[in-house]
Amino acid sequence: MFQQNNMQLAIRIPTSPAQDSSQYMQVDQSDKSLVMSGDMQNGGFTHAEYIFNFSKKLEEDLQTFGMKIKQHEDNIKFLNTQKKKLDESILDLQEFHFVILGKYHSSGTPVAENEVHSHPQSEEETMEQIMQQEKSAAGIICRLNTHHGIQAYNITLTKDVLGIVARLGKVDDDNLGRLLSEYLGMETMLAIVCRTYDGVKMLETYDKEGCINKSSGLHGLGASIGRNLDGRFLVICLEHLRPYAGDFIPNDPQRRLDLLKPRLPNGECPPGFVGFAVNMINIDSTHLFCFAANGYGLRETLFYSLFSRLQVYKTRADMLQALPCISDGALSLDGGIIKANGLFCLGNQEDVQLRFPKASMKSSLPESYIESERQMKELKWKKEKMIEDIKREQALLNNSKLNFDRKKAEFLKFLAESSSYAAQQQLSVKPERLTPR
């Protein structure tokens, strides 16, 4: 006779996913034979086997989700611990900054605050040239920065903006700055540089028909300060640039790229070769390390993308003689420009108004201060990446918990249906009649 308890699987249901995996639903193997033997007597072997196998699969699924939950919880705990260590290291460096600056000023060294915060006159002139482009996106950004100072970069719209190409690099020679600026062109010199693509999307939004929304982004910001944005403008996204993948010149505080010098067919370096344009740009120390979202500095991302292996020669004659070993264009200090292989710029040199500013005298701040500033920049970048990792792990944890709850509900529903089936089987079995002998 088929017994009701033959259909009762010995299964323990966890009250929460945090329980140990050994406490998840266990199916008593002996019950399988009971169910199968009981059901075989009533022609129900296939359904009984299905009940057992499906319950086993649900049990394994719950165990899998439980292990994933535990893994994500452990990852979040570890990342929070590492983030706390980074916070402590950043605080230590900030304290070190104050100590160094205190000793520096108390030593009687004649410096002022402008060595750390303000810009030399040549850079102010570059800023004025940009602001004269009143209807340009760069002009709006610079005007906002001038009127609101550093608070401009706390605005959601512009917090991801690093600056304008013309203001992110300096040169040691005015003539070189003019040539490099002419090579790039006004549109590129006025390009806005963003760290991430999310920052790019903030600058311009669109309606359902794909038309520009003039009340938001830079268009809305320009209108709010009386500078209506007109025409197209370039935006460079650092995280989408392919960075330089080679080595850097050892012990170079400017982290110049260790590019192979050009060689003529005879193996000698071309006469008059001065260097590569990408290495002739001076970059502020705060922009040399971990300034892009992917951890690279401006030289190996922005300026390598703009100049690549653009070569610089003393004279046009030197440049033309070196044609066999020029692959990514060249400049000569007397005005010659080769944009790319086979593309020569002829005619008189343009009178470029907007150009890279001339670098100021080297700061007399202690090397220890500059090094600690670099370390702080790197630590802050690591902290930002750590926060992103924590958010990602939290999202995965929430998803695993949701899947666990759904699978648990499915399991409970299956148990209820199995019990109902067992009850129906019991009612359908008729008692055996005793035959008199």
Image: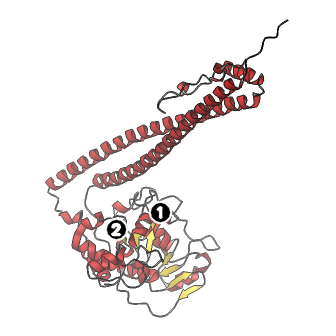
Q: What residue is drawn where x is 35% and y is 52%? A: 380
Numbered disc total: 2
Q: Residues within 10 Å of mark 2 (few under 14, many from 20)?
A: some
User: Please, what is the three-letter code of the amino acid marked with disc 1?
Assistant: Glu
Judge by depth and name the residue closer to the eye, 385 or 284: 385
Estimate the x, y position of residue 4 in percent, counting from the top left: 65, 21
Q: What residue is drawn where x is 48% and y is 94%? A: 347
Estimate the x, y position of residue 286 in percent, counting from the top left: 34, 60
User: Please, what is the three-letter code of the amino acid marked with disc 2?
Assistant: Leu
Judge by depth and name the residue closer to the eye, 308 or 156: 156
Please identify the residue farthest to the top as the structure is shown: 437
Q: What residue is drawn where x is 44% and y is 48%? A: 389
Could you say whether the residue bearing mark 1 is in a helix, strand or loop? Answer: helix
Q: Is residue 65 left or right of residue 28?
A: left
Q: Quadrant of the C terminus?
A: top right
Q: Of the numbered discs in the image, which one, if any, rests on residue 239? A: 1
Q: Are marks 2 and 1 in contact (CB under 8 Å)?
A: no
Q: Is residue 400 left or right of residue 30?
A: left
Please identify the residue farthest to the right as the structure is shown: 437
Task: Tell me the residue that label 2 is attached to.
Answer: 157
The image shows residue 134, relative to residue 46, as above or below, that is: below
Could you say whether the residue bearing mark 2 is in a helix, strand or loop? Answer: loop
